[in-house]
Image: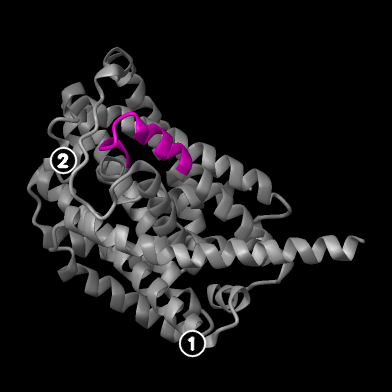
Amino acid sequence: MKNIIFVVIGTLIGAGFASGKEVEIFFLRYGKSGILGMMLAGFTISLIIYRVLKIIEKCNIESYSDLIDNINDNKNTNKLIKIIINSFLLISFFIMMSGISSYFKEEFNVPTIITSCLVSILCYLTLRNNINGITKINVLLVPFLIAFIIFITSLNIDYFTKNFNYIIETKQISIIDNWIWSAILYASYNSITLIPIVIGLKKYVKNNAGKISILSGVIFITLGLCIYSILARGQNYIQYLELPVVNIIDEFGKFYSILYGVVIAIAIFTSAISAGYGFLEKYESSKKTYKQLTASICVLSIPISLIKFSFLVEILYPIFGILGLFQIFLLLKRYKVLKKIEKTDIK
C-alpha cells in the first residue's frame, strides 16, 4: 500500500508545488481562504483516487484508454478526451524540465541547456523501465521529500503563527477568480496526470482503495499547508519570483536553501517521470516503440525547457484544469452507475 501512496504523492508534488509557484497561484493569493481551498483540493483528489480505484477494480481496467472507453460510450468524444489528456501529460513532462532548469539557472547560474540535458538522460533511464522503475524511485525519494518539507516548516512555524492575521488576499487578474474554483481546477488538472499512474499501480492496491485515497489526501493537504505557511512569509514579493520557496528559505541560511534545492530536484524528477509514463503507458505493448518514444520526448524536452517556467504554470495548468473537469464528471457518473448495479445485485 505504501508504494502506491508514495507514487501518488510523487506525482502530485512536482516543480510547481515544491517551488511554491502552484501554491502561490492557486491558494495563497486568496489569503486565508486559500487554506480552505487547499483542503477542498485535497478532498477532491482523494475522492478521485478512490473512485478510479473502485472502477478499475470492478471493471477490470488495464489501461487509461480502457478507462476512457468504460466511462463514456461516445467514441468520437473519447478520441477527443484522449488527445487532450495526452497533450497535457506531455506538456506536464516538459514543464517539469523547465522547472528544474529554472532552479539551477536562478540559484547557481548553471546554463539551462546543461541542466535539461542531464535531467532528460536521468528521466530516460528511469522511464525505460516503465511503472516498475517509477515505483522504485518514488519509494526511495518521496519519504525524504515529505520529511524535509515538514522540517523546513518547523523552522517557520513561530513566524507563521504570529503573523497569520496579516495574511491578505493578493488576487490578480486571472481565469481563476475565487478560491473554490481555483481549488477545483487544481484538483482537476492534477487528476489528469494522476489517473494513468493509479491505473498502472492497480497490482499494489489489494482492497485498500479507501486507505490509499484517504492517506494520499491527508499527506497532500499537510504538505500543501506546509508550503503555504512558508510562502506567507514573503507574500508581498513572491509573485515576482520563479521559485519563491527557495528564495524564502535563504532567510534560514544557505545550507537549508541548498538542501531544499535537492528536495525540488527530487519533486521535479518524480513528477516528470509520472507525467512521462502517463503519456507513454499506452505504448508498453511494443517495447521498441516505447523506448523510441521515451528517447524522443526526453530529447524534445531540452529546447522546450528554455520557455519561462512560471508562464507555463500560470497559463497552461488552469486551461487543462477546465478541460479535465469533463473527465471527472464522467468518472463520478460511471461510479454512481456501478453503485446502483451493485445494490441491485445484492437485492
Mark 2 lies on a secondary structure that is helix
Name the N-terminal-most of marks 2 and 1.
Answer: 1
Comparing labels 2 and 1, the label whose residue is closer to the camera = 1
| Circle number at residue 76 | 1
Magenta stretch, main secondary structure class: helix
The residue that mark 2 highlights is 239
31 magenta-colored: yes
- Residue drawn at x 34%, y 54% as measured from the top left: 269
Q: Hey, what amino acid is under mark 2? A: Gln
**Looking at the picture, how far across and down is residue 187, in whole percent?**
43, 52
Which residues lie in the magenta part?
27-40
**Looking at the picture, how far across and down is residue 59, in whole percent?**
71, 71
**Looking at the picture, how far across and down is residue 257, in whole percent?**
21, 32
On-image quarter of the C terminus? bottom right
Q: Is residue 175 left or right of residue 182?
A: left
* Vertical order, 188 against 152 (above or below): below
* Vertical order, 11 against 304 (above or below): above
Q: Hey, what amino acid is under mark 1? A: Asn
Q: Is residue 163 left or right of residue 106?
A: right
Q: Is residue 58 left or right of residue 18?
A: right
Q: In this view of the protein, which residue sits in the foreground, 171 or 116?
A: 171
The extreme right residue here reads: 347
- Residue drawn at x 42%, y 45% as measured from the top left: 141
